[in-house]
């Protein structure tokens, strides 16, 4: 049997599989057939290559792979036909909205135009949901949205919240998480902080939210950090705020961003507030070693593909069931399986940070849920112990999940906000 026939056999059998892991096995093997053909390998070598790679992946049973060898493909019967919709992520159906609005949020969000259209159409609905972040009273604020092209030629979205009746006592520079943007939930958080006298400045990273770039794609974490430094450095040049204390505020992946920003600008910041910082991804979220090595290899050929197995982040991050459902209203957040290069960058970043915790020496407030299954709370403990700063504080919240300000019961969200504001007040008086 020729290599082309083998590849057809893979496509025919695996297209009917209900296991998501087989989707990237199929794509990888088919891609390697093309590469192998370009390298002028013999048919026998092609067949051997395909067999060896599939058999290697089949060695790891469990939730990622079935116990099937390559030869078993010839006799295995299909289970069910996959829908194209399932490949692109689940479409969320909202009650009480028009078909036209549903079509807008069902659109492919890979390009920024679709994301901006969806946000414009949906922002009033977002702010009206029954979530304590949007029900809390707030002071009169000056809010501004802007777009600015950075040095890499990417149009970056940012937003600021300033108290209207008093001058801000300090500036907070927000670094959002992987499954978030600087709109929606951040809107509620920023309004609360600004109501207590703090100016808040936030931006969407390239490829996230309303900023230009392929949705959810991080080709280089270091370049993303450089984009944040460039944007926030320009913001700090404003004569009205340039002499104010400056604090980094990082959630989840944004915690890793904030730490990397601090390491590149060690003297530029007066402190950092880190909520469930991504210094290490929880073990349950990382595929087995064999799978990880295969994915790293595939990323060199298919960096933008959405192939990495992933559990339901909303279920893992939001303890409150009602708030978990409300997370779907963040319609421009990236909700699909991570792109290969993005996953590699996140994994490499956490491995680097684990080794550099002693390089953190700014005033530090670390907040983490004890039951966080997305980022590892034990590494927050290690950050607290190893950070060189003499001014540091760690607060662990019993039974809390990952999204401390978005997905917990109201009383926990209020408590976390209070802890943050108290710490900021202590460091700005």
Image: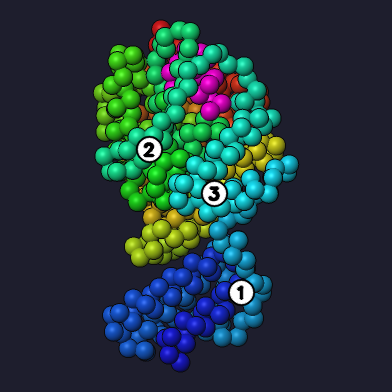
The residue sitting at 51% across, 50% down in the picture is: 109
- Position of the C terminus by quadrant: top left
Q: Are marks 2 and 1 in contact (CB under 8 Å)?
A: no
Q: Few, some or many C-alpha atoms within 10 Å of disc 3 (few <14, some 14-19, many ≥20)? A: many
The residue lying at 56 percent from left, 23 percent from top is 416
Find the distance from the CA under tag 2 to the CA under tag 1.
Answer: 41 Å
Circles 1, 3 touching at the beta carbon (< 8 Å):
no
Residue bearing mark 2 = 156
**For discs 3 and 2, the disc positioned in front in the rendered view:** 2
Element type at mark 2: strand
On the image, which quarter does residue 19 sit in?
A: bottom right
150 above or below 131?
below
Q: Which mark is residue 335?
A: 3
Q: Is residue 40 visible?
A: yes
Q: Residue lying at the far front in this picture: please name it.
A: 100
Alpha-carbon neighbours of circle 2 within 10 Å: few (<14), some, or many (≥20)?
many
Q: Main secondary structure of the magenta part?
A: helix
Query: What is the CA distance from the residue labelled 3 to the residue labelled 2?
Result: 20 Å
* Residue annotated with mark 1: 16
Which residue is at a point 73% across and 41% down the rendered structure image? 96
Mark 3 or 2 closer to N-term?
A: 2
Q: Position of residue 283 (x, y in %)?
A: 50, 49
First in sequence: mark 2 vs mark 1: 1
* Cα distance in 3D space between marks 1 and 3: 24 Å
| Among the two numbered marks 1 and 3 on one chain, the one whose residue lies closer to the N terminus | 1
From the image, state whether disc 2 or disc 1 is nearer to you. Answer: 2
Magenta span covers which residues?
Answer: 187-200
């Amino acid at each position: 049997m020729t290599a082309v026939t083998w590849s057809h056999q893979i496509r025919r059998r695996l297209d009917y599989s209900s296991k998501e892991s087989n989707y990237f096995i199929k794509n990888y093997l088919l891609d390697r057939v093309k590469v192998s053909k370009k390298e002028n390998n013999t048919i026998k070598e092609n067949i051997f290559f395909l067999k060896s790679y599939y058999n290697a992946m089949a060695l790891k049973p469990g939730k990622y792979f079935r116990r099937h060898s390559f030869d078993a493909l010839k006799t295995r019967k299909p289970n069910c036909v996959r829908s194209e919709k399932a490949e692109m992520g689940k479409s969320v159906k909202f009650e009480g909205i028009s078909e036209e609005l549903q079509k807008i949020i069902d659109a492919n969000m890979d390009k920024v135009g679709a994301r901006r259209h969806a946000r414009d159409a949906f922002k009033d609905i977002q702010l009206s949901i029954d979530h304590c972040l949007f029900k809390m009273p707030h002071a009169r604020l000056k809010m501004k949205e802007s777009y600015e092209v950075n040095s890499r030629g990417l149009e970056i979205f940012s937003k600021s919240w300033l108290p209207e009746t008093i001058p801000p006592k300090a500036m907070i520079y927000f670094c959002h998480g992987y499954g978030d943007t600087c709109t929606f939930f951040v809107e509620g958080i920023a309004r609360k902080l600004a109501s207590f006298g703090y100016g808040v400045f936030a931006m969407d990273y390239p490829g996230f939210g309303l900023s230009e770039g392929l949705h959810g794609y991080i080709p280089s974490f270091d370049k993303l950090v450089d984009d944040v430094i460039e944007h926030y450095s320009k913001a700090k040049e404003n004569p009205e705020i340039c002499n104010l204390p400056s604090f980094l505020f990082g959630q989840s992946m944004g915690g890793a961003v904030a730490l990397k920003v601090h390491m590149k600008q060690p003297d530029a910041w007066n402190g950092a507030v880190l909520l469930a910082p991504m210094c290490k991804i929880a073990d349950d979220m990382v595929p087995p070693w064999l799978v990880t090595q295969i994915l790293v290899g595939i990323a060199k050929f298919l960096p933008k593909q959405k192939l990495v197995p992933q559990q339901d982040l909303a279920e893992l991050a939001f303890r409150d069931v009602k708030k978990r459902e409300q997370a779907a209203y963040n319609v421009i957040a990236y909700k699909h399986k991570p792109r290969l290069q993005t996953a590699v960058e996140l994994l490499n970043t956490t491995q680097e940070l684990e080794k550099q915790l002693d390089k953190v020496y700014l005033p530090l407030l670390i907040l983490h849920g004890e039951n966080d299954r997305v980022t590892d709370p034990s590494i927050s403990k290690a950050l607290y112990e190893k950070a060189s700063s003499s001014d540091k504080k760690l607060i662990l919240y019993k039974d809390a999940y990952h999204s401390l300000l978005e997905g917990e019961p109201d009383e926990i969200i209020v408590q976390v906000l209070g802890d943050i504001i108290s710490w900021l007040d202590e460091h700005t008086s």
